[in-house]
């Protein structure tokens, strides 16, 4: 079957052929005829199967007739992240180059005024994230009563990011007679409830089992220690020893861990960029562009890059952190092995990740191969790596551990303070950057001579009687003011 047999217009077929595509993917072949027939569609397919083109191509055909009015878009596409929204706009620019369509991108991190001016000129296709769309609507700058076609893409990601209440509000703002296209890779209970509420007799298009992984992706799990420096060392070894590694996406669970790992990789000579939700839009766009162009072969990212990003030639995916939710694993490794290419997905797991790995295997219905990292390092090499990684990431030993080490070396209870520590001339630094002069037992400050000791300050308890020299000369009080030396007369 070719694209010309799906009912698409001649302009769209010519644009697809110019892009180098001749045969539609299974979800495109099944979904496009239903979309052109004005039916609601529920599309379920794993990531990387061409879901975006499954709604972009028929929309271009349907929008060839008609004209948009000011502030009243004809079609609306909702995406969970800014990157996905920008990617969909690129598809419209590529396949709709021969058509005079106004396509607007309404996302956060961009000036409201620029977006408002686009809406004022009239928009045929409005691509938006839910939060920014509702901001424009609440300001009275946008009317959704003219929407003929609503697309909700990556619905399961919308659920994970907490956008379902916003989706419900938006669905109530668009006409009841609209056509709705609903695409997702997994079908949690909440997503099933949304489809039953807002879709009318939808045509179900399912080209793979929910939460399945591509057969072209080789999956494995590598065990390592629980310490952060051990995981970083394992990752560096895996990157250096990987076969046919062209580029790779490295996923972390937390945004803070993304920043720490990014700095650590750069310190060890790897060309890497970071991508997470706290970055401004210009930095996020620049990082993705560098990765797509091959200028930076490593992308350290949070789950903001796990859904729907179309970077076809990603050869490897590393899960530096095993995801907490099994569905996220499916989407992460879906960044590689796209469009029939082969890919490799390696997860670095500690003993604490056993339950998460078991949940992932239960979801995807297969056992992930356990592999050996092949990392053999001497104790001194491991210690040097530990020191370097800790200095690069800014980590410090907990104060409790440092106090315990000092207490063991000085023979005093943990948490206590000694007068000797206060009188030391300098403070040492241990190999992890923490205070540890007492634990190392070297270069200690010499004890202060009795003649050089200062008298106790006012308000400080005097030293015990047993520690004083009874035969010493009277102390010199010449430094005290005269009124403190006056004798006190007791009243009888």
Image (cartoon, rainbow, N blue to C red):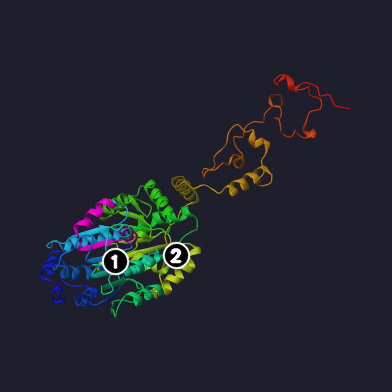
Q: Percent from the top left, x then y, of residue 57?
A: 19, 69
Q: Magenta includes 129? A: yes
Query: Where is residue 222 shown, x and y percent of the image?
Result: 43, 63
Which mark, residue 21?
A: none
Asked if residue 273 lies in the magenta stretch, the reply is no
Q: Nearer the viewer, residue 5 or 470?
A: 5
Whether residue 29 is visible: yes
Dot 1: element: loop
Label 2 SS: loop
Query: What number is the disc on residue 337?
Result: 1
Residue drawn 48% across the image and 46% down it: 387
| Whether residue 244 can be seen here | no
Left or right, 99 with reference to 142 = left
**Nearer the observer, 423 or 156:** 156
Mark 1 burial class by Cα count in 10 Å: few <14, some 14-19, many 20+: many
Report whether 430 appears left or right of 144. right
The residues colored magenta run 112-136
475 displayed left or right of 266: right
């Amino acid at each position: 079957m070719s694209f010309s047999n799906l009912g698409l217009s001649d302009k769209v077929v010519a644009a697809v052929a110019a892009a180098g595509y001749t045969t539609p993917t299974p979800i495109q072949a099944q979904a496009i005829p239903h979309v052109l027939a004005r039916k609601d569609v529920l599309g379920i397919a794993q990531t990387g199967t061409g879901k975006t083109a499954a709604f972009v191509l028929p929309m271009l055909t349907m929008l060839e007739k008609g004209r948009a009015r000011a502030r009243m878009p004809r079609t609306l596409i909702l995406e969970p992240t800014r990157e996905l929204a920008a990617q969909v706009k690129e598809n419209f620019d590529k396949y709709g180059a021969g058509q005079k369509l106004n396509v607007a991108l309404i996302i956060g991190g961009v000036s409201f005024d620029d977006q408002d001016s686009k809406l004022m000129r009239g928009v045929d296709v409005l691509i938006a994230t839910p939060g920014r769309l509702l901001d424009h609507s609440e300001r009275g700058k946008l009317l959704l009563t003219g929407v003929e076609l609503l697309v909700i893409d990556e619905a399961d990601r919308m659920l994970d990011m907490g956008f379902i209440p916003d989706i419900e509000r938006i669905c109530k703002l668009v006409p009841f007679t609209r056509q709705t296209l609903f695409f997702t890779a997994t079908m949690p209970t909440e997503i099933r409830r949304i489809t039953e509420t807002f879709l009318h007799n939808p045509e179900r298009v399912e080209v793979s089992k929910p939460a399945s992984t591509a057969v072209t992706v080789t999956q494995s799990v590598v065990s390592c220690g629980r310490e952060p420096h051990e995981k970083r060392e394992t990752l560096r070894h895996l990157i250096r020893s990987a076969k046919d590694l062209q580029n790779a996406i490295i996923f972390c669970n937390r945004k803070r861990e993304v920043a720490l790992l990014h700095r650590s990789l750069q310190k060890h000579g790897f060309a890497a960029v970071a991508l997470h939700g706290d970055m401004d839009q210009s930095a996020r766009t620049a990082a993705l562009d560098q990765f797509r162009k091959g200028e930076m072969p490593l992308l350290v990212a949070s789950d903001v890059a796990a859904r729907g990003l179309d970077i076809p030639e990603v050869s490897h995916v590393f899960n530096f952190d095993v995801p907490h939710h099994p569905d996220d694993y499916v989407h992460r490794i879906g960044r590689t092995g796209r469009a029939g290419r082969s890919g490799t997905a390696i997860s670095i797991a500690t003993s604490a990740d056993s339950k998460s790995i078991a949940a992932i295997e239960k979801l995807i219905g297969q056992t992930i191969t356990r592999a050996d990292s092949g990392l053999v390092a001497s104790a001194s090499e491991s210690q040097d790596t530990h020191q370097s990684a800790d200095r690069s990431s800014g980590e410090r030993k907990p104060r409790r551990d440092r106090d315990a080490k000092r207490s063991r070396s000085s023979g005093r209870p943990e948490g206590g303070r000694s007068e000797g520590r206060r009188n030391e001339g300098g403070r040492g630094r241990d190999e992890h950057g923490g205070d540890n002069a007492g634990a190392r037992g070297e270069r200690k400050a010499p004890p202060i001579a009795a003649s050089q000791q200062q008298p106790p300050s006012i308000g400080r308890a005097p030293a015990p009687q047993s520690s004083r020299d009874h035969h010493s000369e009277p102390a010199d009080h010449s430094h005290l003011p005269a009124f403190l030396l006056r004798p006190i007369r007791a009243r009888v």
